[in-house]
Image (tube, rainbow, N blue to C red):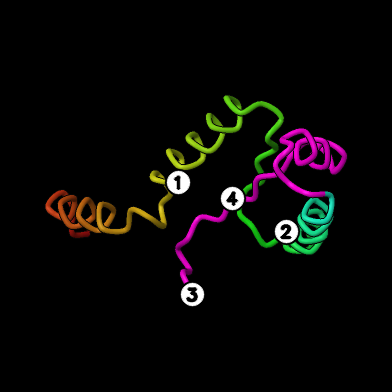
Amino acid sequence: MYPDALLLFTMPPSAKELENRLVGRGTETPEVISQRLAISCKESQYMNKYDYLIINDSLERAVDQVHNIIQAEHFKVSRNTKAISEMKSQLKMFERSN
């Protein structure tokens, strides 16, 4: 629906770590944890459809990676067509006729 969307898939370093985190919270029943893990299994089938993969082994590092990706995306040529067009237009005055 949004062709310009930047898609980031965030995941823990391993499936076992995901399970450990869900269990360690102590807020979910074993049934809910099982459902969440099954959903994660289904979601993993689409990981290759995303633009970037963030492995959340450290919250601070993951946040930095997301921030850096977003910052870098602002400078993509495809996201700056207006500035490119304006510069090309301005540079026309220096064009030489041969």
- In front: mark 2 or mark 1? 2
According to the picture, the residue beneath numbered tag 3 turns out to be 1
Seen at 61% across and 54% down, the residue is: 51
List the single residue furthest toward the bottom: 1
Q: Earlier in the sequence, mark 3 or mark 1?
A: 3
Q: Residue furthest right?
A: 16
* Residue assigned mark 2: 48
Label 2 secondary element? helix
> Which residue position is annotated with label 1?
73
Q: Name the residue type under label 1.
A: Glu
57 vs 30, left or right, is: left
Distance of label 4 from label 2 (alpha carbons): 10 Å
Could you classify mark 3 by the number of other residues whose Cα lies within 10 Å: few (under 14), some (14-19), or many (20 or more)?
Answer: few
Task: In the rendered structure, find residue 8 and report the number of the disc placed on it.
Answer: 4
Q: Earlier in the sequence, mark 1 or mark 4?
A: 4
Local SS, label 1: helix
SS type, badge 3? loop
In the picture, residue 56 is in which quadrant?
top right
> What x and y, as percent, mark residue 87?
22, 50
Cα separation, mark 3 vs mark 1, equals 19 Å
Give the residue type that dot 4 points to. Leu
Packing grade of label 4 (10 A; few <14, some 14-19, many >=20) is some
Q: Residue furthest left?
A: 93
Whether residue 84 sits left or right of residue 41 in the image: it is left
Query: Taking 50 as reference, is 19 above or below it?
Result: above
